[in-house]
Image (tube, rainbow, N blue to C red):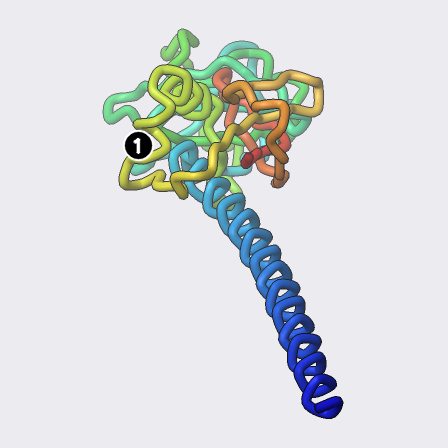
Amino acid sequence: MKKKGISHIEMILSFTLFIAAVGFGLYFFNTGDSSRLVDTTLTYAIREIEGNTSTSIEVFSVGVNSSAIPNGPLALNFSGIGGNASVETYDGNILGSSRGGDGNELVYVSSNWANENVLFVSFGEEFQDGSVPTGAEHNETYYKIGSSEVRVLLSEKKFKALGGRYRADYKELKNQDNFNLPSRADFGFSLVFDNGINISAENEIPDNFEVFSKTKRVEVLKEDGSRAFADLVVKVW
């Protein structure tokens, strides 16, 4: 009888330990699943934000023989390249420019180029045509077009538009086919420039909610045609 009692106690103890182990295992694996879900959601949100706000530009480097060029606008021939252009100096300063010529093949640069040896001419869908006079004579000895590259950037204009959609109808944005986040997750996003300018779209976060965030360094095409680096910050709660 004594032996049976001991066996009964051992069975209860074993069962208790088993339940504790199962509980610990469920807690452990559930925590891991939650962590993976958060990380996946953050990664997916960043990808979707980039997909909704990206734009591409083609950038050409141009060597300028400034000593040979008379004062006034400089005409550059980019035959076969469509779209409006943006011209900037090596230091990133934007110069006035306009498209012109019989076939719109020329880019006219304002006279501020005079002290520059290198210019960068970019073409893209978001650039606005300027008001530089288009009557300057084209002379191919004044410059030499060098290498080019295509860059994919975040568009400040598109980022602001996405923020407007976020504020206007958050649920629709969150649940639409190309931005389909988990129903139990909420999110917000911001673009923080090095000069402190912050463009954000973020609903109020409840006090008792844990917030997770992820930051990615990105290059941004600004509305004035210049380029700058910023931190893309996405939060999930």
Q: Amino acid at mark 1?
A: Gly
Q: Position of residue 152 (x, y in %)?
A: 47, 41
- Residue under the image location 44 percent in, 21 percent down: 163
- At mark 1, the secondary structure is loop
21 relative to 108, above or below: below
The front one of 185 and 221 is 185
Side of 157 where 29 appears, left or right: right
Number of numbered discs on residues: 1
Relative depth, front residue between 156 and 121: 156
Residue lying at the far left of the rendered structure: 103
Which quadrant would residue 118 be assigned to in this image? top right
| Whether residue 58 can be seen here | no
Pick the quarter of the image with the N terminus: bottom right
Residue at image coords 49%, 36%: 153
Q: Residue at x 63, y 32 (%)?
A: 231
Establish if 135 lies above or below 154.
above
- Residue tagged by mark 1? 82
Confirm whether residue 76 shows in the render.
Answer: yes
Q: Position of residue 51 (x, y in %)?
A: 40, 40
